[in-house]
Structures are given as structure tokens and as C-alpha cells.
Amino acid sequence: MPDFIQQPMAIERRSMELIAPALAGLGLDAQQEKVYARLIHASGDTGYAPLIHCTPAAITAGLAALRSGCDIFTDVEMVRTGINKRKLAQFGGQVHCLIADAQVAAAAKAAGTTRSLMAMRTFGQRLTGSIVALGNAPTALYEVLRLVAEEGVHPALIVGIPVGFVGAADAKAALAAQTTVPFITVEGTKGGSPIAAAAVNALLYLIDNNRD
């Protein structure tokens, strides 16, 4: 059997060394580099580098919200599961997902829409001051943008990285076009729950990188 790196942090350090050349020339500051690197690390794809978009205020806003004990609201359980809830709890925050809620499911069926969209509608004003992390459903991202535009909801940060070929690219373009809420996104069809969770964890690790 060939020799291979086994220690988790050593694997991570070596991964970041291999990712670094993909970030060269993008004009990123040190914090942005760490966030971008974690998205690339989660995807295993350096092709993400030029597709990631992070507004100048996004990291600052996300860090401030986490330090203040903000909650995180997700579109699907896969995003909720991927977020480091133990570390989040150290700051006083919790992760919420209503995709499996019976009342949300019934309301979505009655309205002829997705459970993810209805979950965001149900959260409503609770999203204000929070981090919204979306990795699956473009409909959820569209609903959050509607809540911002029409109902005065104001998350601290939107991590909007839904994946897929129907609606995802357009929803993310709509996110990038608005100027009300700081955001982190990935252009086009790429993305997914692991990538959205990785963005949130990147922020958590910028505050405290201790993995004990």
C-alpha cells in the first residue's frame, strides 16, 4: 500500500496548498482566500475559483452576525447537517430547517409550490439578522429575495448556492443583481448543499479554527 497522509489537519493543509494557485490573480484578501478555498475544497474542483462571487461586505457581515449569536436558516437538511453546529452553538446560534415540517409540506402542496420556498415564507421576519444558507432549491432563493424586496426582511448574509439546471443560474443571477443584502454565491449551475455548508463553516473557522 502506498504512503498517504492520514492526519486530518495535515490533509487539509496540503489541500489548501494545492488549491492556492487557483486563487492567484483573483485579487482576494486573506479572508476571502480562506472562504474561496473552502468552497473549492468541498467541491474538489478548482474550476470554482472564478465562479465564486462574494460581495465586499459579505465576510464582515457574516462574521459579525455569527459573533452576535445569529441563527442560520437552511433550505434542506443536507445543508443543516453539513454546518458545524457545535461550533455555532459556542456563539449562541442554532440551525433551522423546515423542509420536513408537516404544516410546511401541506401549505406547499396547497399553493402548488416547493416545500423549500414555503419554508422560507414561514420563517419570514425570523430571517432578519440571520444567515440564510441555501444549497439546493432555487425557489427558496427566489422567495428570500422576494421577502427582502417586498416585506422588508433583511438577513445579515445570504449564502445562495443552489445547484442544478432549472432555475439555479437565474436565481443566483438575481441574488447577484440585488444590492440590499451581502451575499456569497457561485455563478451558473454549480453549487449544492456541501458547498453552501462549506461557506458557513469557512466563516465559523475564521473566528475559531480550533477543531477539538
Image (cartoon, rainbow, N blue to C red):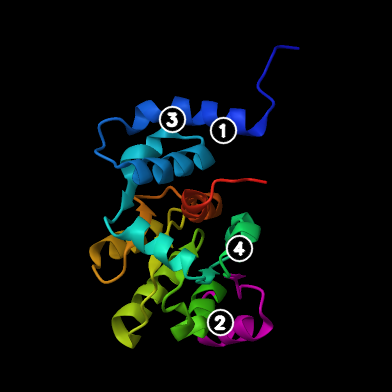
Of labels 1 and 2, earlier in sequence is 1
Query: What residue sits 58% from the left and 65% below the top?
Result: 76
Give the alpha-carbon distance from disc 2 to disc 4, as whole Å. Answer: 34 Å
The residue labelled by disc 4 is: 90
Give the alpha-carbon distance from disc 4 to disc 1, as whole Å. Answer: 23 Å
State the residue in front, 84 or 2.
Answer: 84
What is the total number of numbered labels drawn onto the structure image? 4
The residue labelled by disc 3 is: 19
> Residue 30 falls in which quadrant of the image?
top left
Check if residue 97 falls in the magenta segment.
yes
The residue labelled by disc 1 is: 12
Secondary structure category for the residue under label 1: helix
What percent of the width, then of the height, locates residue 175? Answer: 31, 64
Kind of residue at badge 2: Ala
Check if residue 132 falls in the magenta segment.
no
Of labels 2 and 4, earlier in sequence is 4
CB under 8 Å between callouts 1 and 2?
no
What percent of the width, then of the height, locates residue 7? Answer: 68, 29
Give the alpha-carbon distance from disc 1 to disc 2, as whole Å. Answer: 41 Å
